[in-house]
Amino acid sequence: GTYVNISNFIALNWTDTMAMFQYYSSESNSFYIQRIEDIRSTNKPGCMVQIDKKKGSCVCLNAIAGIMHIGSFLEHDPFDKVNLDVHEGGLAYLGRVKVEMQNNNRDTVVADHYMKWAFH
């Protein structure tokens, strides 16, 4: 298969009170906000704002999932009350992957691949 050449940007930010995720593309921007209090104590995923650049529209919705936070990939996530074992959906190291990019330089990217129930 081949990859579509796109230019996107993501940004993550955490403070003592908020977790934020921003996704920018040529067609739309998405902003996700979740209170640390909600990450710690409940399953409230926060809110999502989507800006469609082509349509010139802006929509605010309840987010469909919580935000990845700074401890999401620790073996024992401090906000994970369930603390699942690797075989039940907890953090698992899947190995090192090497991917050849479909660009003019045929660059190679090496990354450690982890998987956790909702974050992959």
Image: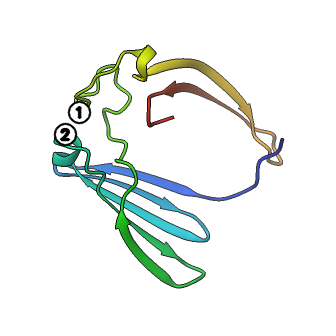
- Tell whether label 1 touches label 2 (CB within 8 Å): yes
Q: Position of residue 94 (x, y in %)?
A: 56, 19
Q: Is residue 65 left or right of residue 105?
A: left
Callout 1: helix, strand or loop?
loop
Callout 2: helix, strand or loop?
helix
Most foreground residue, 88 or 57: 88
Quote the CA–CA distance across marks 2 and 1. Answer: 5 Å
In the image, residue 50 above or below residue 3: below
Question: Toward which corner of the image does residue 86 lie, by quadrant?
Answer: top left
Mark 2 or mark 1: name the one nearer the start of the chain.
Answer: 2
Q: Which residue is mark 1?
A: 79
The amino acid at mark 2 is: Arg
Task: Kindly identify the residue that appears in the image at 35 percent across and 33 percent down.
Answer: 72
Location of the N terminus by quadrant is top right
Q: Which residue is mark 2?
A: 40
The amino acid at mark 1 is: Phe
Task: Kindly identify the residue that appears in the image at 60 percent across and 71 percent down.
Answer: 27
In the image, residue 101 above or below residue 20: above
Q: Is residue 48 left or right of residue 3?
A: left
Say few, some or many: other residues with alpha carbon within 10 Å of mark 1 (under 14 / 14 to 19 / 20 or more).
some
Q: Is residue 43 left or right of residue 58?
A: left
Q: Is residue 51 left or right of residue 63?
A: right
Scheme of colours in the image: rainbow
Q: Position of residue 91 (x, y in %)?
A: 41, 22
Q: Position of residue 81 (x, y in %)?
A: 22, 28
